[in-house]
Amino acid sequence: MTITTTGDTAAATPRSQPRRTTGAGARGLRTLGLYTLSVLVGVGIWQLIAMKYGSSLVASPRETVSAAGELASDGTLGNSIIASSRRILIGWGLGVVVGAPVGLLVGQIRIVRHLLEPYIEFFRFIPPVAFVTLAVVWLGIGEPSKVVLILYTAVFIVTLNTSAGVMAVNESKLRAAASLGASRRQILQRIVLPSTVPYIVTGARLAMGNSFLTIVSAEIVASQVGLGSLIWTSRNYGRIDWVFVGIITLGILGFVYDRVLRLIAIRVLHKYGAKV
């Protein structure tokens, strides 16, 4: 009887796994179908607006695709994507690397919070576009000025989200760990940091979005290559279709980068509760 029961259980297990796999596959197909439907509806609305206002104001989807092919054929689009992506990723990455540790210090050490909070609260309300001129004067029209502006954009967002995560840690956990003899470093590593990871990921995602907002203004003022520069140059030539190509490319890049960040967070940081 025991052997028969074990065999029945072993036989039932493989049959239950394909059902879960099939269910996940069905959900994936349904999500893909909804995404496709949403995009088609959006393109349809876009086409109707273009038909109403004309190509001088709104480029149609066909005109935009044609313009994208034109810009891609001479390398303008590819060079613009590479230049903007490089600036965004470097500035955003530095913002995360600097903002996360500062946020941990601000959230955990009261004196550090009191010393830095006035500066954080002051500068985070000043938009990066206000510093474009100073960045060009101080750092020149090269890459450093754009990277520093994006770093400025990202660092305060990551710092605030990280510090909020630290201060949201349950006080009873901290007291229990301290009563058991845990040092400040052990409490930081074992309790505070794992509980703060979801907040850091959220801050990183928000900072990525704001980095895309900053890159356009930075490249318009001080760049010959990049998606912001492409949009501004297109305006000077009266090419509305090129403007649409630049705008849509920014949206696609942002969507892709955010999805990649979410995937990495889910795969690498899932044990810390990073569900995004």
Image (cartoon, rainbow, N blue to C red):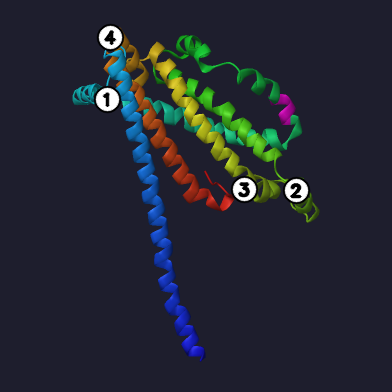
Q: Secondary structure at mark 2?
A: helix
Q: Position of residue 149 (x, y in %)?
A: 49, 20
Residue type at mark 1 is Pro
List the residue tagged with mark 4: 238
244 relative to 36, above or below:
above
Q: Residue at x 36, y 31 (%)?
A: 252
3D distance between C-alphas at marks 4 and 3:
52 Å
Q: Is residue 200 above or below residue 266?
A: above
Q: Is residue 126 left or right of residue 266?
A: right
Q: Is residue 242 visible?
A: no
* Amino acid of disc 3: Pro
Q: Which residue is mark 2?
A: 174
Q: Earlier in the sequence, mark 4 or mark 2?
A: 2
Q: Quadrant of residue 217?
A: top left
Find residue 14 and report its image quarter: bottom left
Q: Which residue is mark 3?
A: 194
How far is mark 1 from mark 2, CA to CA? 56 Å
Q: Is residue 237 above or below residue 114?
A: above
Rendered residue at 41%/65% (across/down): 19
Of callouts 4 and 3, the N-terminal one: 3
The answer to the question of whether label 3 and label 1 lie on touching residues, with beta carbons closer than 8 A, is no
Tell me the CA gap for discs 3 and 1: 46 Å
Task: Tell me how far mark 3 sits from mark 2, CA to CA.
Answer: 13 Å
User: Is 145 left, or right, of 54 in this rendering?
Assistant: right
Span shown in magenta: 112-116
Q: Nearer the viewer, mark 1 or mark 2?
A: 1
Amino acid residing under circle 4? Gly
Mark 3 and mark 1 lie on one chain; the one further toward the N terminus is 1
Question: Which of marks 2 and 3 precedes in the sequence?
Answer: 2
Mark 3 nearby-residue class (10 Å; few <14, some 14–19, many ≥20):
some
